[in-house]
Image (cartoon, helix red, strand yellow):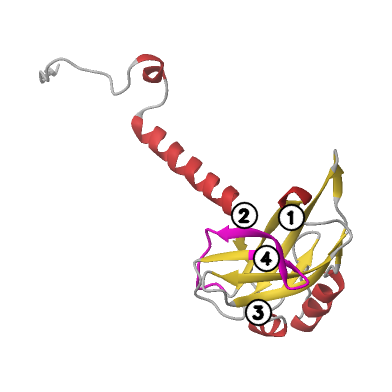
Amino acid sequence: MSSRRTISIRRGPSRPLFRGKAAKFTPPRVASRGLSIAVLVAAVAWGGVAAADMSRSVIAAFKGDLVVTKSELPEGKTDKETISRIKAERLKELTGEARGDVTSWLFHYTAFLAKTGASELTMEFWIDKKLAANKRINGFDPKLPVLSGDLPIDEDEGLTKGKAYTVKLVTEKNAVVAQTSLVMK
């Protein structure tokens, strides 16, 4: 029969890492991972910007264009088919939804940037050479040539139902990197 000896090391008084109700929850390693995931999810949700993966010929066909659609861009089997599907899905008029006495619009945009390198962009809505509204877009890789996301905007932010706007995506140095025309209905 073998004899086992247990050796215990005396460490002094132990104290919990958390006090109160927090002591009953997850250990620190899991909590920090959970916090990292929560921060990542919040950052993605706040910015609402994603990178679109497309071929060079599709990007070249729309370079400098801001494509507004109801949802994400369609893909075809070939580049030519993809380009024709994008052109077919592109919206020139956007119908809003009435919420009380205010009309709001939610649309999906894909910006084929004429120039990359900006760390922050602003989507500006112009009417008759006057700025009507703007929305800041950040949280994206400045090297990406194509950006995609959803954008909510309403009449309280300066838009008027029934008006035609020139929508521009502008860098912090006021360089226009993508634009389109859009009627808000």
Residue occupying image coordinates x 36% and y 18%: 23
Residue occupying image coordinates x 88% and y 56%: 95
Q: Mark 3 or mark 4: which comes first in sequence?
A: 3
| Between marks 3 and 1 in the image, the one whose residue lies nearer the viewer | 1
Q: Which segment did they paint magenta?
A: 123-144
Residue on which the image places disc 2: 48
Q: Can you tell which mark lies on residue 124? A: 4
Mark 2 Cα-neighbour bin, 10 Å: few <14, some 14–19, many ≥20: some
Residue occupying image coordinates x 67% and y 65%: 124
Dot 1 falls on a residue whose secondary structure is loop
Alpha-carbon span between mark 2 and mark 3:
22 Å
Give x and y (percent) for residue 1: 15, 16
Alpha-carbon span between mark 1 and mark 4:
11 Å
Q: Mark 4 or mark 2: which comes first in sequence?
A: 2
Dot 3 falls on a residue whose secondary structure is loop
Q: Main secondary structure of the magenta part?
A: strand
Q: Mark 2 or mark 1: which comes first in sequence?
A: 2
Give x and y (percent) for residue 152: 72, 52
Q: Nearer the viewer, residue 179 or 44?
A: 179
131 in magenta? yes
Dots 2, 1 in contact, CB < 8 A: no
Answer above or below: position of 13 versus 119. above
Q: Mark 1 or mark 4: which comes first in sequence?
A: 4
Give x and y (percent) for residue 72: 74, 62
Q: Nearer the viewer, residue 10 or 126?
A: 126
Name the amino acid, label 3: Ser
Residue occupying image coordinates x 74% and y 81%: 79
Residue on which the image places disc 3: 55
Alpha-carbon span between mark 3 and mark 1:
36 Å
Name the amino acid, label 4: Glu
